[in-house]
Image (tube, helix red, strand yellow):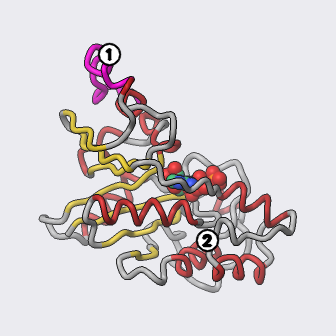
Amino acid sequence: MNIGLFGGTFDPVHRGHVALARAALQQCKLHRVYFVPANIPPHKQRQPLSPFVHRFAMLALATSEEKAFVPSLLEAPEEGATPIRINARTEKDRQEKPNYTIDTVRRLKQSCKASDKLFLLIGMDAFADIAKWHQAEALFRECEFVVASRPGYSLADVANALPESLRPRPEVTRPFHKQPATGDLVLPGVTIHLLADLHQPASATAIRQAAAAGKPLGRFVDAPVAEYIRKMGLYK
Ligand code: ATP
């Protein structure tokens, strides 16, 4: 099986995320995509975050129509996915270890067959920082990447974002500057499938701002997620 793993904060999940997963499903012939909300995202620890259960519930709603999409508890809080725990994050939570993708990938692999292939789904804005991720080189060894491009990014931007030990020399990437970030990029120890621009400008930040201002959310999220945000009074 080809298995996709799509990690994020998902606060909340929106149409940009779903479009990325759909495009990856088709282009890379994935059989399943796990949407993995991070309990404690390593790169977003300072901003206030909605409780894990709310972010997970919205993912469950947003993925319910697609058989291949699975909301995942791989990065659920330590005490498990106890649905009782709906309070805001406590001091103890803040002291918990961040969820590193490499640990999640290794945990997922334990339940996979040796013949299964893992694909890590990621947007170009997040991929631009990939070299700073915990054990970045190991991630490229463990999985192929599926990167959703954005207008204005070239193949050179993708190659230059790689961890130093995997980054091609400048004379190799020079011709990449004129090439848009599409197609497959295969280098020693690295396989990246590039998804063309998805034309989905949604962002969770814009949704939180719209919800706080009492504006409609239908532009960014499907009705069940919009209704959940309203009912639970999120982002007020
Ligand atoms: P925020 O606005 O809070 O930073 P976000 O909308 O970027 O959040 P995340 O949960 O941080 O959402 O993103 C998870 C993944 O989805 C990241 O890899 C990110 O690059 C990607 N992503 C986010 N928005 C889009 C979009 N509109 N199109 C394609 N990929 C996206």
Indicate the secondary structure of the residue bearing disc 1. Answer: helix
In the rendered structure, which amino acid carries the disc numbered 2? Arg
Residue 134 at x, y = what percent?
Answer: 42, 42
- Please report the residue visible at 63 percent of the width from the left and 57 percent of the height from the top: 202
Residue 74 at x, y = what percent?
Answer: 43, 69
Q: Nearer the viewer, mark 1 or mark 2?
A: 1
For the stretch drawn in magenta, the main secondary structure is: helix
Task: Classify mark 2 as within 8 Å of ligand 1 or not, answering yes or no.
Answer: no
Q: Nearer the viewer, residue 77 or 15?
A: 15
- Side (left or right) of 196 relative to 99: left
Residue 9 at x, y = what percent?
Answer: 57, 59
Taking 228 as reference, is 9 above or below it? Answer: above
Looking at marks 1 and 2 on the same chain, the residue that comes earlier in the sequence is marked by: 2
Does residue 164 belong to the magenta stretch? yes
- Please report the residue visible at 46 percent of the width from the left and 83 percent of the height from the top: 65
Q: Nearer the viewer, residue 93 or 104?
A: 104
In the rendered structure, which amino acid carries the disc numbered 1? Pro
- Please report the residue visible at 65 percent of the width from the left and 65 percent of the height from the top: 220
Magenta span of residues: 160-177
- Please report the residue visible at 48 percent of the width from the left and 63 percent of the height from the top: 19
Mark 2 Cα-neighbour bin, 10 Å: few <14, some 14–19, many ≥20: some
User: Based on the displayed image, in which of its 4 quarters is residue 13 positioned?
Assistant: bottom right
* Residue, disc 1: 170
* Residue, disc 2: 55
Q: CA distance from mark 1 to mark 2?
A: 41 Å
Which quarter of the rendered picture does the C terminus lie within?
bottom right
Which quarter of the rendered picture does the N terminus lie within?
bottom left
Residue 231 at x, y = what percent?
Answer: 77, 83
- Side (left or right) of 59 relative to 23: right
- Side (left or right) of 222 relative to 81: right
